[in-house]
Amino acid sequence: MLSKSQFIRGRQCHKSLWLHRHRPELRDETTDAQEAIFASGTDVGQLAQQLFPGGIEFAYDDGTLSEQLKRTAEAIVSGVTTLYEATFEYGGVLVKTDILHRGANGWELYEVKSSTKLKEVYLDDIAVQLYVLRGCGLTVAQASLIHINTEYVRQGEIDVQSLFTRLDVTTEAEARQTDVVAAIAEQMQLLAGPEPVIDIGPHCDDPYTCDFSGHCWAHIPSPSVFDLRDHGKPDAFALYRQGIVRLEDVPADQLGWRQKLQVAGTLRQENRIDTGAIRDFLGELTYPISYLDFESTYMVPVPLYDRSHPYQQIVFQYSLHIQDVPDGPVRHHAFLAEADQSDPRPAFIATLLQHLPESGSIVAFNQVFEIGRLNELIADFPELAAGLAALPERFVDLMAPFRRKEIYLWPLHGSYSIKSVLPALVPELSYATLAIGNGSDAAQGWLELLAGTDSAAAARLRQDMLDYCHLDTWGMVRIVDKLREMTNHVAADG
């Protein structure tokens, strides 16, 4: 039996399909972020059912496969108008249809995706369902994709008619039928044979990141050509196909100056410090200096609050360290919204404007994120825009000198994220000791708070989230201190 998801897996990579069937224990562990994506997809599917209310839903794990097939067949015969998650099998291929609706001219097949646009892989998905349904004797008049409408803005209860976009892809799905039949036969044949010999390649992440990457990439040393920064994967695979895998084997004429710097740093533990450029950067900072970091939700397809749209990141936390004068004391302010189901943004804005000085530099690490969220707040809350509008132009990006390689430390291995920079410059500070060590963990923590937990666990989680965000801004304070020390030492030595 070949399921729809297995068919799609096989379209991406025959080896992945074979491993899924015969060596599932080699699969990579699922992350919390991936679980959140899966859960959001399920929520979208449930909401889309409201486009065709009054149907019969077949639970995914309700009974044996034969029982699910029987119940679906009985529902079809009984004259039911709409079925959710109905099960069909034809020619050894098993599919579950998101929505199947009996229209005036025949059955209408609807595949629901949490994406915002049509993708090639979705046409394969719908085409194999069309093949099975017609093979089972159903007259399918239309095959459509239902996806998220990016223009939707929530106001009150979710308006499912506006949240979703319907796209008729019947012609495209029908045009793929010959290819679907051939692909099914090919996949069934390979599953009966030995593990196919397929090397790694761009297909490992296209259209989906394969969950057997840990197994298939185990032979790649660390570091390798795939760790080269500012060097796209197509270029890395071009080197790999030439038999060049280790950094030391890369011809110098195939590297830009940034990659050469990374290779030299990794192999010979060389650092590069452009003290003049660092002095210029530090000269951009004006006091009082505000070190600011935001945390936001996952990009979920269904807007959580009014005045928000699909896949918008909603800020719920910030940390702020303020230094009024050079070498002066540093004070701290923090905000973490209450997980009471209300929109955290109004309180976020009010508290931020209360604590943030009216002048001076605002330092962020990768300012694009903070400025992006501020611009969204300005657009979504125009009544508060007067207090926010002047903030973006005050930002200074602490990541900039590291991204420009004005300072390069070999332990960074080409990275310029704060998670790499901070322990390299300030070894006594590390995210590794924290219960929450990255923004994804913080977003997951917020979801857990919203879902509800006992008071003791919630208190611990809130403190863990506060500790993480605090380190982001305190770490920036210490990084700037270290940059000043570097330039002062050079001046003293000169």
Image (cartoon, rainbow, N blue to C red):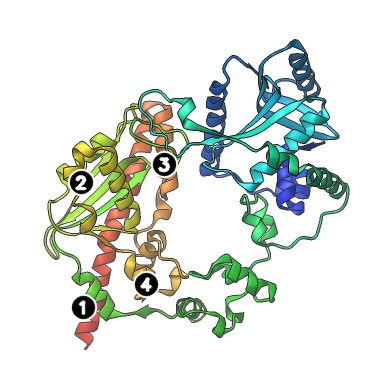
Closer to the chain start, of discs 4 and 2, is: 2
Going by the numbered disc 1, the residue's amino acid type is Asn
Q: Quadrant of residue 96?
A: top right
Q: Are marks 1 and 4 in contact (CB under 8 Å)?
A: no
According to the image, label 2 marks what residue?
388
| Extreme residue in the front direction | 105
Is the residue 370 above or below the residue 140 in the image?
Answer: below
The Cα atoms of the two marked residues, 1 and 2, are separated by: 36 Å
According to the image, label 3 marks what residue?
443
Q: Position of residue 124 (x, y in %)?
A: 70, 43
Of badges 1 and 3, nearer the viewer stands 3
The Cα atoms of the two marked residues, 4 and 2, are separated by: 29 Å
According to the image, label 1 marks what residue?
488
Of badges 4 and 2, nearer the viewer stands 2
Q: Quadrant of residue 118?
A: top right
Q: Are marks 2 and 3 in contact (CB under 8 Å)?
A: no
Who is closer to the viewer here, 427 or 282?
Answer: 282
Going by the numbered disc 3, the residue's amino acid type is Ala
